[in-house]
Amino acid sequence: MAEQHPLTFDELMALARASASVARACSCAIDTYREWTRVPAGFPQAQMRPAGTLVADPYADPTYAEYHPGGTGYWSPDAPIAPRWFPTNRCTVQQCAVCGRAALTYVEAGGYYVEPRIRALDPRLLVDAPLTE
């Protein structure tokens, strides 16, 4: 797998704004994944292209702390998207080659399973929050 471009916050915001401006329907259905969800079995991965990564250092173990100053939680559709915080700090950004929408993706690794997850990249929820731990 080729190394992906590390995205700056400004680049991420530009992708999010472009994604939010797409009005057409598409089989990717990225716009329906407002909160973290399991990547559906029928997801059209073949029409996705890598847009970059939010992994700051592939050799470091980033924080598992989450950023929820407003009392949201991991599964909330209103949870902030904070690139330095879990799980966004482990994400790649994929963009649909058909419609142009962008999504965050990562693999959740539990004790007995791995589960690819996806969430739409929403500019209203992006926040450039520094780590405080």
Image: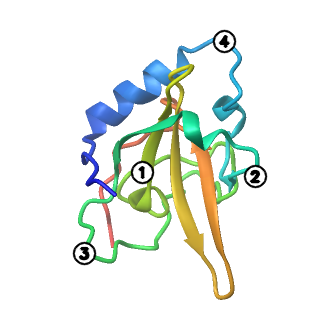
Foreground mark, 3 or 2, reads 2
Q: Which numbered disc, 1 or 3, marks the residue that appears first in the sequence?
A: 3
Disc 2: CA contacts within 10 A as few (<14), some (14-19) or many (>=20)? few
The image shows residue 39 at horizontal and vertical percentages of 68, 52
Q: Name the residue under label 3.
A: 59
Q: Are marks 3 and 2 in contact (CB under 8 Å)?
A: no
In the image shown, does 41 or 8 lie closer to the viewer? Answer: 41
The local secondary structure at tag 4 comes to: loop
Q: Name the residue under label 1.
A: 92
Q: Name the residue under label 4.
A: 24
The image shows residue 38 at horizontal and vertical percentages of 71, 56
The image shows residue 72 at horizontal and vertical percentages of 64, 54
Q: Which numbered disc, 4 or 3, marks the residue that appears first in the sequence?
A: 4
The extreme bottom residue here reads: 111
Q: Which amino acid does label 3 sit on?
A: Tyr
Relative to 118, is 24 above or below?
A: above
At 67% from the left edge and 79% from the top edge, which residue is drawn?
A: 113
Q: Which numbered disc, 4 or 2, marks the residue that appears first in the sequence?
A: 4
At 31% from the left edge and 63% from the top edge, which residue is drawn?
A: 131
Quadrant of the rendering where the N terminus is positioned: bottom left
Indicate the quadrant where residue 56 lies: bottom left
Q: Residue 41 carries which label?
A: 2
- Measure the alpha-carbon separation of dots 4 and 2: 22 Å
Q: Which amino acid does label 2 sit on?
A: Ala
